[in-house]
Image: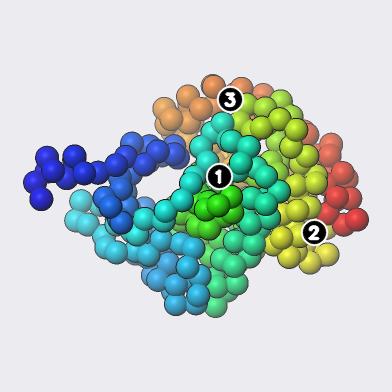
Amino acid sequence: MTAEDDATNREVLTGGMVNAGAVFRHGALVDRPAPRTARAIHAHLLALGQHGFDAAPTPIRLTQDGREQLTFLPGDVALPPFPRWAMTRTALTSVGSLLRRLHEASAAIPVDIQAAWPLDLADPEGGTLLCHNDVCPENVVFRDGRAAGLIDFDLAAPGRPLWDVAMTARYWAPMLDPTSATALYPAGLDAPARLRILADSYGLSLRERAELPDVIEQATAVCRAFVARRVADGDTIYLQALAERGGWERWDRIQAWLVSHRETFTAALLH
């Protein structure tokens, strides 16, 4: 195949911020920039398949020009502003179940302690489970209205299972004040009720439910620090996103809202 043929037959896959415009589909394969921990991630993905988790891409190879090829997962991916079909109760329940399946398979796989796992969104307390850390709508593949696949393990790092649940809740409840949520999500989402649905579908214990609101606040602070580092480094993508979404005032509002509604979230999770 010539370079011209290759360009003609490839499809640009949209979504995400960092790799926007650099991810392509070639038939049954996805070709994308390889993360720094690609070798460790590929080993983990292969092990997931061996432990019965069939909802992640299968790695094919790394290329000499710093890219990776994985199998393409067919289905629908929600992009912002997120459509209502991706925010139904059925969709949310399936996300919780998918995350539980991922964690059950991952629990049987030793974490590669030699890998330089990214700390960007990692659990500051660490852990023995490889968390995805970025189960946002853009990284979940749906079929027939249910979560059927999980992609983009670039930010995976060791942590607590509850940390991954908290990160997921931030995107899917969502754990945002109403003003912030309006810009990206359909109107009328009941965050406390949806947080309970996620906890139920994942199967959190009573102890984990009691801890979840605090871990969500911790995860939100980590996400803010991640954005701050990118902005301080002059990353134009994050500078633009910060400006378009309300600047640091938005982050102040979100964090204040989480604290003021902590008891509401706890009650929804426990009663």
Identified at 64% across, 50% down, the residue is 91
- Tell me which corner region of the image, top left, top right, bottom left or bottom right, holds residue 49: bottom left
Residue matched to label 2: 209
Cα distance, mark 1 to mark 3?
18 Å
Percent across and percent down for residue 153 are 46, 56
Quadrant housing residue 131: bottom right
Task: Place residue 162 in its image quadrant.
Answer: bottom right
In the rendered image, which residue does mark 1 sit on?
A: 137
Q: How crowded is the residue under tag 1: few (<14 C-alpha within 10 Å), some, or many (20+)?
A: many
Image check: 153 left or right of 249? left
Disc 1 versus disc 3: nearer the observer: 1
Which dot marks residue 152? none
Determine the residue located farthest toward the front in the rendered image. 144
Q: Looking at the image, is 107 positioned above or below residue 26?
A: below
Of the residues shown, which amino acid type is indicated by label 2?
Answer: Arg
Depth check: 169 or 236 in front?
169
Q: Say which label, 2 or 1, has the lower sequence index.
A: 1
Disc 2 element: helix
Gap in Å between the C-alphas at discs 2 and 1?
A: 23 Å
Q: Earlier in the sequence, mark 3 or mark 2?
A: 2
Spatial distance from mark 3 to mark 2, Cα to Cα?
A: 30 Å
Q: Which residue is mark 3?
A: 245
* Dot 3 and dot 2 residues touching (CB under 8 Å): no
Residue pictured at 52% horizontal, 53% vertical: 143
Q: Is residue 7 left or right of residue 167?
A: left
Side (left or right) of 271 relative to 187: right
Question: Looking at numbered disc 3 in the image, what kind of residue is underneath it?
Answer: Arg
The disc, 1 or 3, on the residue closer to the chain's N-terminal end is: 1
The residue shown at (55%, 73%) is 105
Q: Residue 45 or 117: which is nearer the viewer?
A: 45
- In the image, is 235 to the left or to the right of 256? left
